[in-house]
Amino acid sequence: MKKFLLILFVIASINSFAQNPWDGIFEKYYKTVFSIRTIDADGNDKIQGVGFFIDYKGLAFSCAHILEKEGEKIIVTHDNRRYPIKEIIAKNEKTDIVKFLIENKDKDSLSHLKIANHAPYENDEAFSIGIFNNDSMTFDYGYVSTVRMFKDVGEGILLTLPIFENNNGGPLLNSNGRLVGILSLPLAKKFEMNFALSLENFEKLKAVEKENEIDSSQIKLTHQELVEKYGKYYDSLKNSEIRFQSLGDSIIDGWNMFVRMDALTDFIPHFKDVLEIPGSYDFPFDSFGFIKILNSPDNKFRIFNWTLKFDNEEYRYYGAIQFNNLDSLELVPLFDGKKHIEFGMEEDTFLSNENWYGVQYFDMKYVKTRKTEYYILLGWDGNNSLSDKKVIEILTFNDKMPVFGAPVFKVEGETKYRQIFEYNDEALMVLNFNEERDMIIFDNLIPKDKKDKGREWLYVPDGTYNGFQIKKGKLIFKEMVLSK
């Protein structure tokens, strides 16, 4: 039996350290990854790529192009167990994903990954596990640059970690070891970016039909199910979503500021008209790569959020809150007014939809106690060419009108209405919810040089993590909750 020659850690962006948020990811999950090999006429095998298990019986994912290569195919696990592929369950050649089942005659219990319940967010940590031809395993890590839509593929994740032959077809993991995507080398080459397919594509696999057999009644049933789910105006909503794609591309990638502004000016009134269509609240608009949609955990409303980038690398933010009302449209627009907030008062005042502190929200949490209830919003602001910002915002409602900010932040004896972090444009800052600790975790920021204290555009993470403990409706600052 072959033995692994070594365990190789390929560090993609930062040095390894102990007691960090992703400590032990490799040790816990390397057994879930296997190599996919072809066997030639002489009985020799060659690694073509990797895959991973998603249940203990042998259900697995990989890239479709790997299984299309000529020759008999087997999979080989970390401990050199060899299994033939029993059945291709589903595949999508455009998105390069295949779902299959191995032939597990001995009913071995296989280590497997759990799928995350949402896509990753910008600046989230990301990890991959792969296998070299000499059977040594690799561990790469980096960060999520952004999540956006790609033509003919759908939602994709851009990364700072490298994609090579050794992790082609392998899993993309978050800091909790949950599956958030799959790495495809051909698509990375196509888009000329470090690219992974997001979870959305796992749900869009096309079932493999029997040869020359297409069940048209099933296709009709699928459409009927969609109509039943989203209402009789489903086709109108779907067609409108498709028409908006070209506008969305111009809003993001227009060759200059005026093209992007014209596209946005055209989009806003037409989108409002579409939201007037009955049943629009339940329609996901999930092909909108240029809009972030956050649904409230209690399903009372959702937030549409998008950006306009200027040529000087500054941003203007747009948003709208749609309430869950099946009878009529209840929509509150959000107007980016942060430039008009009195200097020094950004963290110490209530704001309305008319002077909203505009950001791109990427996560939301509902907090309820006997005395209060509110929503915590996490957001990103591109700010300018020198610095970015991350924001923790509080959202409440007064007769369905949004109120932003609340005196719930307790920071070293001070009370704040929101928390704003500014940091160097070249740095990456972690800001996310930690459900196990019931905290918000974030990087501690310090100046690159002691003489730059107070110049926040020069601040960078120092390798330690602070947090806000959610306790009795308050957010209590905690120092050094994690360290490298």
Image (cartoon, grey):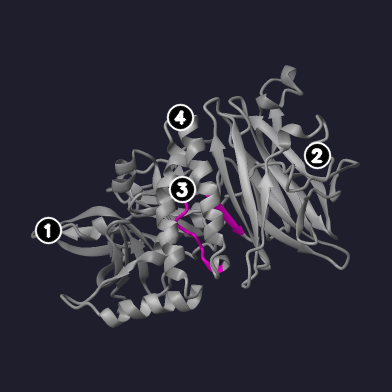
* Magenta-highlighted residues: 282-294
The label shown at residue 148 is 3
Image-based side of 250 in relation to 382, left or right: left
Of tags 4 and 2, the one toward the viewer is: 4
The label shown at residue 256 is 4
**Mark 4 or mark 3, which is nearer the start of the sequence?**
3
The label shown at residue 82 is none
User: Disc 1 vs disc 3: Cβ atoms closer than 8 Å?
Assistant: no
301 up-or-down from 334: above or below: below
Q: Amino acid at mark 1?
A: Asp
- Taking depth in this image into account, of 246 and 128 the one nearest to the observer is 246
Furthest residue in direction left, as rendered:
41
User: Disc 1 vs disc 2: Cβ atoms closer than 8 Å?
Assistant: no
Provide the secondary structure element on which disc 3 rests. Answer: strand
Find disc 2 in the rendering and name its residue: 347
Question: Is residue 160 among what the camera can see?
Answer: no
Image-based side of 258 in relation to 463, left or right: left
Q: Which residue is found at the position 87% from the left and 68% from the top? A: 370
Q: Cα distance, mark 4 to mark 2?
A: 33 Å
User: Disc 4 vs disc 2: Cβ atoms closer than 8 Å?
Assistant: no
Of tags 1 and 3, the one toward the viewer is: 3
Q: Amino acid at mark 4?
A: Asn
